[in-house]
Image (tube, coloured by chain):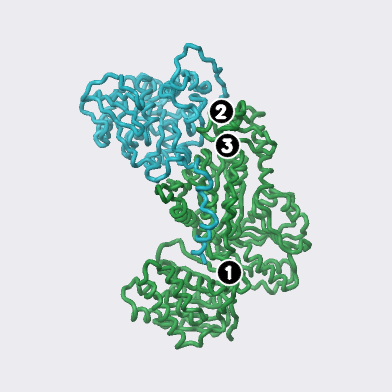
């Protein structure tokens, strides 16, 4: 039994970390993308530099689905260590490609898949010199095999190699030679193309393939951020690397060579957020990127920023907890710790991008919100959004856009007023006015995390203390109106609905289609900001059964909804995915249908 | 502790500086520390020093962490911007603030608890980054606000008020700063205003990280017999080895010093620190020699005071290393920071 599908299948490639397979996988994915076919790539990698197993999944989807499909149609086995489990994972009717330099008949016990042996090591040993080159080329070689099997255009592959190695033309030729070796072997030995293959489409125009960390970093450049302080932590590091790389190109004065930014690698996360506060307090837009452990360490300073009303932008690229957890796997497990970071009565504004495109726009918006509200704003990515390449619409920039610096009194305003009071609610929106040092003698004030009056002076007086605390509540209410509104889908009249956030979005879209094909129509609300506004309240009130889909064990989004809205707790039903792999559409379909009592048969095993 | 504002009344005959301000204009709110606290003398020296160099109050940023010493930022230069942050983390706030605006004066007030225990990491890394600030440690060997526990600067053998004897070796901020490459390292005594004022002035003008470790006895918890940080012990064991005069830019050197024993160190704006050696065998501009000299005297139980080490470090200052523009980052116009729509299209080409 074989499966025949055009532009609709998933390939999984099992390799060894540090063998250069990333270039081969990117090459494959981009050549499919440039053929106009929607494609997605997800990297499942170990917390390791070299030697441990790593997988890459490429999903070709004519319908543009961006989530994991939950099954594997073509498996490329390049790692002897994981061979047995990789073989098991191929869907019935699928294909398995392995390095037949060392035949392994004992392991090939699948009658329902087509096994194709390619002597990759032998081909490379015969054609290339040097151990490292042979290892690297073996990976490029399987890309050549797949090119023949899937009917990819070799000219497009050459074009991509030429772009990648623009400065090293010799590498274009050697890589192309490895591609050709694999390609020719497949053509000579197998019936090419397979029934699973690609066919040119025109659905990727106006789109890019980009990861969320890169898009967020670009957003920081466009937001006018000038001080970047950070401490390396997976999976957020590439956000800072990308910012540095963009800033080196776009922010260095061509005439003077001066850098219009400061990039500070701090001694730890505590110092990183401290620097961010110091810079924002002094009128420069500043940010940091971290992950769950970093948010824990930054807690004390986040409380200070909340209470002393200092803007800050923090990107939390969430990974798997608790504790060190699994640093290279994905989860949405910091929703609670971010929203309520620090001791005492603190609450923080959070934004929840669902893809790299939103990472860009929300990064820009985060700086506006942080300065408008004079408080930390946390942009909650996760490893799946941050480090995987997603197909998304071209990022746009409106040249007329200006930064919203919020309520800042400059020299002229200060000249006019009699006396400046830092924490007085003049406009009755809970947001006071601030000043920057060095601007005007009247602008001076004392910032402190200890009890203070609305005039900025120290206090231990109950009434004076409460005036400030109560105003902070009003400010948080103002934030509800300013954070990005939820996104709604569906008729709005369904009895049951899905509520979710962030990177679950791709899987939910696909799941909604599948569920609809079974005759069940659900409404869907994706929240994009915390605190939750009135639209969220309304949607929750209007639906009887609400599936809260999220990627953590303890139902943290559900907890936030329960704590921060008027929703009746019993209406909320959790679908929790916390394996560390991105949630698949199948998990949601199975979960919803099982609960609705329609699809008991569909729930056939462990959530994948 | 409550907030007590001071009445702003200045006698017409009070002397005025170049800005037309009196010393009263450099005061802050009333101190709520114990009567006789060494920290209040340091506050007075900061007021005198700031007035003396005609510092514009609004151009001064005062930063601190947590502890008795950290409270004092509220007690001087009320017209300056203050930031009382969290325990041991003042250096990171100072770093961010300085990165945003290199044009202001930054003074950090810390204590031995704030800098040598919880904040040891940030203290060290501020030195490594050669952050342009004056960092004063008001060093009394004890935790005052929590009632007299030993701090990391307590000497071996020193006795606590309730009789406990410290047996752990101290961390000496002066040796540590020299070890980490600080270019301006001084030690002084809260009771020696004559020495302290020019040190503060020179430290404020020094283009890089300047440390002054000020022995500042705690009258309530560490001023008894058997303590090595009491007023009496400090007076008996402290030995000035270098006198520093701060000479502002374009001002004639009026101080009288004999050639041969005076070493002028130029600062970036043309002002100078003139070091006068009181000990003949001591070279304060040589980091290694200074380190050895100070360490040998500590072994003998002597606190050397004065500007113990001073050398120019302009090339390693944070902004110099990071090639930031002369114009502070917080004053760059938005249009200069945002690359625009066309540049974005070019960037996106790489992702197609």
Q: Chain of mark 1?
A: A
Quarter the N terminus of chain B occupies:
top right
Which callout, 2 or 3, points at the residue further toward the start of the chain?
A: 3
Q: Is residue B183 above or below residue B251?
A: below
| CA distance separating discs 2 and 3 | 19 Å
Q: Position of residue A496 (x, y in %)?
A: 75, 62
Drawn colour of chain B? cyan
Q: Which mark is residue A442?
A: 2
Contact, mark 1 vs mark 3 (Cβ under 8 Å):
no
Q: Secondary structure at mark 2?
A: helix
Q: Position of residue A315 (x, y in %)?
A: 54, 51
The residue under label 1 is A205
Viewer-closest of A560 and B61: B61
Which of the two discs, 1 and 3, sits closer to the camera?
Answer: 1
Q: Is residue B96 above or below residue A570?
A: above
The residue under label 3 is A308
Viewer-closest of B244 and A48: B244
């Amino acid at each position: 039994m074989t499966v025949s599908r055009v532009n609709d299948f998933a390939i999984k490639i099992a390799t060894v970390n540090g063998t250069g397979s990333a270039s081969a996988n990117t090459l494959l994915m981009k050549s499919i993308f440039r053929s106009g076919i929607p494609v997605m790539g997800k990297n499942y990698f170990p917390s390791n530099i070299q030697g441990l197993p790593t997988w890459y999944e490429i999903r070709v989807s004519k319908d543009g689905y961006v989530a994991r499909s939950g099954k594997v149609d073509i498996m490329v086995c390049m790692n002897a260590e994981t061979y047995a489990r990789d073989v098991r994972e191929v869907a019935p009717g699928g294909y398995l490609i392995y390095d037949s330099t060392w035949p392994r008949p004992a392991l090939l016990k699948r009658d329902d898949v087509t096994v194709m042996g390619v002597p990759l090591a032998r081909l490379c040993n015969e054609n290339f010199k040097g151990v490292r080159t042979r290892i690297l080329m073996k990976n490029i070689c399987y890309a050549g095999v797949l090119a023949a099997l899937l009917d990819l255009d070799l000219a497009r592959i050459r074009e991509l190699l030429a772009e990648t190695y623009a400065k090293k033309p010799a590498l274009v030729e050697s890589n192309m030679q490895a591609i050709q070796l694999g390609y020719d072997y497949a053509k000579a030995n197998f019936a090419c193309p397979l029934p699973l293959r690609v066919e040119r489409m025109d659905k990727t125009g106006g789109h890019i393939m980009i990861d969320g960390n890169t898009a967020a970093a670009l957003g920081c450049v466009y937001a006018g951020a000038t001080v970047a302080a950070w401490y390396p932590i997976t999976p957020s590091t590439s956000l800072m690397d990308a910012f540095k790389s963009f800033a080196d190109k776009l922010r260095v004065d061509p005439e003077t060579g001066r850098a219009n930014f400061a990039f500070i690698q701090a001694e730890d996360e505590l110092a990183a957020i401290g620097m961010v506060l110091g810079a924002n307090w002094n009128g420069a837009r500043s940010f940091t990127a971290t992950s769950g452990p970093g948010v824990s360490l930054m807690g004390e300073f986040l409380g200070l920023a909340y209470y002393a009303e200092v803007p800050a932008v923090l990107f939390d690229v969430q990974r798997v907890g608790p504790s060190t957890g699994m640093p290279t796997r994905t989860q949405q497990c910091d929703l609670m710790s971010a929203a309520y970071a620090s001791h005492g009565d603190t609450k923080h504004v959070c934004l929840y991008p669902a893809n790299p495109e939103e990472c860009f726009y929300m990064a820009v918006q985060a700086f506006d919100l942080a300065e408008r509200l004079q408080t930390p704003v946390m942009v909650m990515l996760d490893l799946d959004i941050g480090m995987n390449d997603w197909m998304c619409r071209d990022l746009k920039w409106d040249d007329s856009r200006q930064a919203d610096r919020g309520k800042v009194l400059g020299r002229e305003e200060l000249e006019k007023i009699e006396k400046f009071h830092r924490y007085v609610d003049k406009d009755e929106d809970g947001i006071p006015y601030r000043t920057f040092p060095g601007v005007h003698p009247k602008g001076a004030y004392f910032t402190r995390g200890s009890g203070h009056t609305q005039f900025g002076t120290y206090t231990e007086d109950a009434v004076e203390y409460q005036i400030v605390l109560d105003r902070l509540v009003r400010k948080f209410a103002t934030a509800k109106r300013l954070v990005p509104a939820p996104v709604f889908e569906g008729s709005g009249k369904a009895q049951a609905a899905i509520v979710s956030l962030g990177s679950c979005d791709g899987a939910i879209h696909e799941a909604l289609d599948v569920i609809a094909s079974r005759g069940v129509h659900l409404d869907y609300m994706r929240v994009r900001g915390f605190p939750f506004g009135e639209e969220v309240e309304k949607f929750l009130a209007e639906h009887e059964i609400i599936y809260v889909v999220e990627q953590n064990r303890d139902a943290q989004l559900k907890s936030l909804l329960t704590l921060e809205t008027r929703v009746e707790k019993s209406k909320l039903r959790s679908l929790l995915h916390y394996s560390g792999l991105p949630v698949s559409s199948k998990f949601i379909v199975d979960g919803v249908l099982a609960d609705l009592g329609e699809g008991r048969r569909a729930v056939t095993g462990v959530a994948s | 502790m409550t907030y007590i504002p001071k009445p702003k009344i200045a006698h017409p005959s009070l002397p005025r500086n170049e800005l037309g301000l009196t010393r009263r204009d450099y005061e802050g709110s009333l101190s709520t520390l114990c009567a006789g606290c060494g920290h209040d003398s340091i506050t007075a020296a900061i007021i005198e020093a700031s007035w003396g160099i005609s510092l514009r109050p609004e151009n001064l940023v005062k930063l601190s962490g947590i502890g008795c010493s950290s409270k004092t930022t509220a007690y001087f230069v009320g017209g300056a911007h203050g930031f009382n942050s969290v325990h041991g983390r003042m250096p990171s706030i100072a770093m961010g603030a300085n990165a945003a605006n290199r044009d202001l004066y930054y003074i950090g007030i810390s204590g031995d608890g704030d800098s040598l225990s919880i904040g040891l990491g940030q203290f060290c890394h501020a030195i490594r980054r050669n952050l342009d600030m004056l960092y004063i440690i008001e060093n009394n060997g004890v935790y005052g606000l929590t009632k007299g526990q030993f701090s990391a600067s307590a000497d071996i053998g020193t006795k606590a008020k309730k009789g406990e004897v410290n047996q752990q070796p101290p961390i000496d901020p002066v040796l540590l700063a020299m070890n980490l490459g600080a270019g301006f390292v001084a030690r002084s005594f809260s009771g020696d205003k004559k020495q302290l004022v020019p040190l503060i002035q020179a430290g404020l003008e020094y283009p890089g990280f300047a440390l002054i470790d000020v022995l500042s006895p705690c009258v309530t918890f560490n001023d008894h017999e058997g303590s090595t940080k009491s007023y009496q012990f400090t007076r008996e064991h402290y030995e000035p080895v270098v006198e520093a005069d701060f000479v502002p830019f374009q001002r004639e050197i009026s101080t009288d010093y004999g050639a041969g024993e005076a070493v002028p160190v130029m600062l970036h704006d043309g002002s100078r620190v003139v070091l006068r050696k009181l000990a003949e065998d001591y070279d304060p501009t040589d980091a290694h020699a200074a380190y050895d000299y100070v360490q040998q005297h500590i072994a003998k139980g002597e606190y050397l005071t004065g500007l113990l080490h001073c050398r120019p470090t302009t090339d390693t200052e944070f902004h110099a290393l990071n090639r930031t523009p002369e114009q502070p980052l917080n004053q760059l116009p938005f249009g200069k920071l945002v690359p625009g729509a066309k540049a974005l299209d070019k960037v996106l080409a790489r992702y197609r």
